[in-house]
Image (spheres, rainbow, N blue to C red):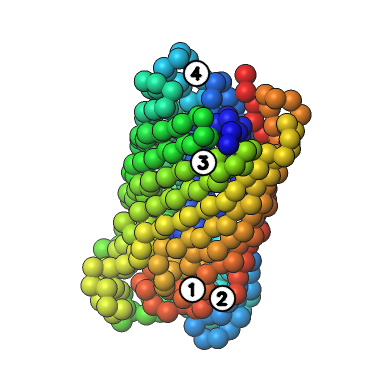
Amino acid sequence: MKLTTLQSAILLSACVSPMAFAGGLDRSGQSISAFLQPGNYFEAGISVLDPSVSGQDKNGKAVNDMAGDYYFPTAALKVQATDHISLGLLYDQPYGADAKYEGENAFVSGANVAPLGISGGTEVTVKTQSLSLLMGYQPNENWNLYAGPVYQSVNGDVKLRGSLFSVLDGNNLETGNDYSWGWLAGVAYQIPEIALKASLTYRSEVEHKIDAKEQINYARIALKPYETAGLLNLSTNPIDTFTFSTPQSVNLDLQTGIMANTIAFANIRWVNWSNFVVRPFKLGQVSQATGPLVGKPNGYNLIDYKDDQISVNAGVGRKFNDKWGANLSVGWDSGAGNPVTTLGPTEGYWSVGTGVRYNPAKNYFIGAGVKYFWLGDADAVTGAHTEAGRFSNNHAVGYGLNIGYNF
């Protein structure tokens, strides 16, 4: 049976929305599929996610939806410089967080600390941007070896509020942008006659040394002197520096023709969240003084995760005619362990999605997709791993739009 060409198969699978509500801070999924398109190619897209995450604090008080909506753009340019050399530039926003707690619960500062200038709820915003520059070598029509540097920026703002955080109630952290380098490398194999294609891509961790304006509420600390005897040497610098690394990851992408004009596809992704640790300088000093009281003699972190993340997305795509194609997909994400940080209190997901693609002409397309996520129930803990709350029966809806152009 004659199968669709590899080019049609790749373009058909491209209408799969790249959005994700994944473990840890994972967002874009860091796809390089645009770089593996034939010929010269440009692609741009945007994804929007609308999550709903609510639950109860450790005292049983209601926590209304704390997850903010967010969007992230992607763009890619690939040039086939010669028969054996290709160049690519990929832009995405690989990691992020957006959370805000409101209402009357343990994630929101109470009236008892208002005279100390502490008010409002816990909030977090984390943003990253990434540029990947790739060079590929194709010794023949089947193999593609590629590698290149990755330039990444990160910034964040965190406000810790509420009785859950004890002496850290009132802590503010504001960072500027930090820019740093990593790298990626991979290999792809294809058999065009049967629309078979496989690629394996490794991305290194990216180490950031970031300057932060961190405010500790000293009046709040003074309320609990029995917890803070070790804080006499707390830094008074207006700006402190700390380091952390965004995680290494591996993506495995597979697709094959299964009948005329129909392909099956799958993506498997691993992210090394178990080694991800964020401990700002002043918070680290506080944690070393108070950690022994909560069984953490070496202190504790602002963010860490118990496990690595594994996610799987699989489906089928079909080309109906020269202008229209569609796909269906299902997804699963392990999350990064349970209990989880209060900055994103879900444990993985199951998802189902669909996408359509319209080709006004043979050399360009417009694609759109929608995906529904059943978010995993999770027990939330503070950075000290003390009980914070329970979040269950949550969901998210994602939407995506992309365009592609061969030239």
Of helix, strand and loop, which one carries label 3? strand
First in sequence, mark 3 or 2: give its number. Answer: 3
Measured in 3D between alpha carbons, the distance from the residue under mark 3 to the one under mark 2, in whole angstroms, is 37 Å
Residue at x 37%, y 80% (from the top left corner) = 224
Identity of the residue furthest to the top in this view = 82
Measured in 3D between alpha carbons, the distance from the residue under mark 4 to the one under mark 1, in whole angstroms, is 46 Å
Measured in 3D between alpha carbons, the distance from the residue under mark 4 to the one under mark 3, in whole angstroms, is 23 Å
Mark nearer the viewer, 3 or 2: 3
Tag 2: amino acid: Ser
Q: Quadrant of residue 218?
A: bottom left
Q: Tell me: residue 190, above or below residue 57.
A: above
Of helix, strand and loop, which one carries label 4? strand
Query: Does any portion of residue 21 appear in the rendered image?
Result: no
First in sequence, mark 4 or 2: give its number. Answer: 4
Q: Residues within 10 Å of mark 4 (few under 14, many from 20)?
A: some
Relative to the observer, which residue lies in front, 245 or 100?
245
